[in-house]
Amino acid sequence: HWSEYHASDESLAITIDHIETPDAVLDVLRPAIKQSKVKHIAIDDDGTPKPWKLAEFIDDIIQTNHTVTGVGFTGVMLSNEEWGTICNAIRIRHQSVAMEIFQVRRCFVDGMNMEVIKKILTSNSAEVDLGTNRMFSREVSIIAQCLNSNPPLARLSLRDNHFNDA
């Protein structure tokens, strides 16, 4: 029961997997997630038509719910500006509570924009997963430059990319 959950010290992990989340659904979920003890939020292969307020939604959740320590996206296509909004929310939030994991997998079909890579890698997350984003050797130098700009970074996953194309 919901009241028993709120009375305990347990936290939730929410995964929205292969479920469309248009703006109206995000508007319904927002108040509940903002006040719940949610530790991790994952959005996987949502299939939602764009444009969409997901970046604004995640920004709001990260800024207001300080029990959230992980966000994950798989197969979620956002604009560079929207990824920037999420990265900035994590960076700002890090001043009070660190983000443990920031996962962005299979979200870029034509490789990643250099600015987006920079924003993700300097978001002040302890773990960053950029697997399966069609990155190539041209992105290696920007990745190397960013490693010193994220002191909390303890783990970086780049699996299933294409760095052997040089």
Image: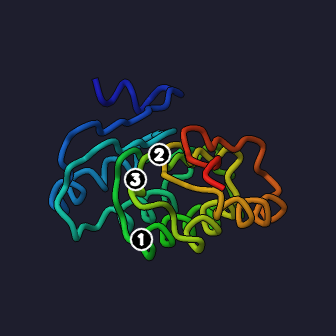
Which residue is labeled 3 in the image?
34
Residue at 44% from the left image edge and 76% from the top image edge: 81
Front label number (1 vs 3): 1
Where's residue 75, x and y in %? 35, 47
| Badge 3: residue crowd in 10 Å (few <14, some 14–19, many ≥20) | some
Q: Secondary structure at mark 3?
A: helix
Where's residue 89, x and y in %? 54, 66
- First reached walking from the N terminus: tag 2 or tag 3: 3
Can residue 67 be seen here? no
Compared to 92, does 10 lie above or below? Answer: above
- Give the spatial CA distance, label 1 vs label 2: 16 Å
Nearer to us in this view, 32 or 99? 99
Residue 127's disc number: none
Residue at 36% from the left image edge and 64% from the top image edge: 78
Compared to 51, does 38 lie above or below? Answer: above
Quadrant into which the N terminus falls: top left
Which residue is labeled 2 in the image?
105
Residue 82's disc number: 1
- First reached walking from the N terminus: tag 1 or tag 3: 3
- Give the spatial CA distance, label 1 vs label 3: 20 Å
Amino acid at pointer 2: Arg
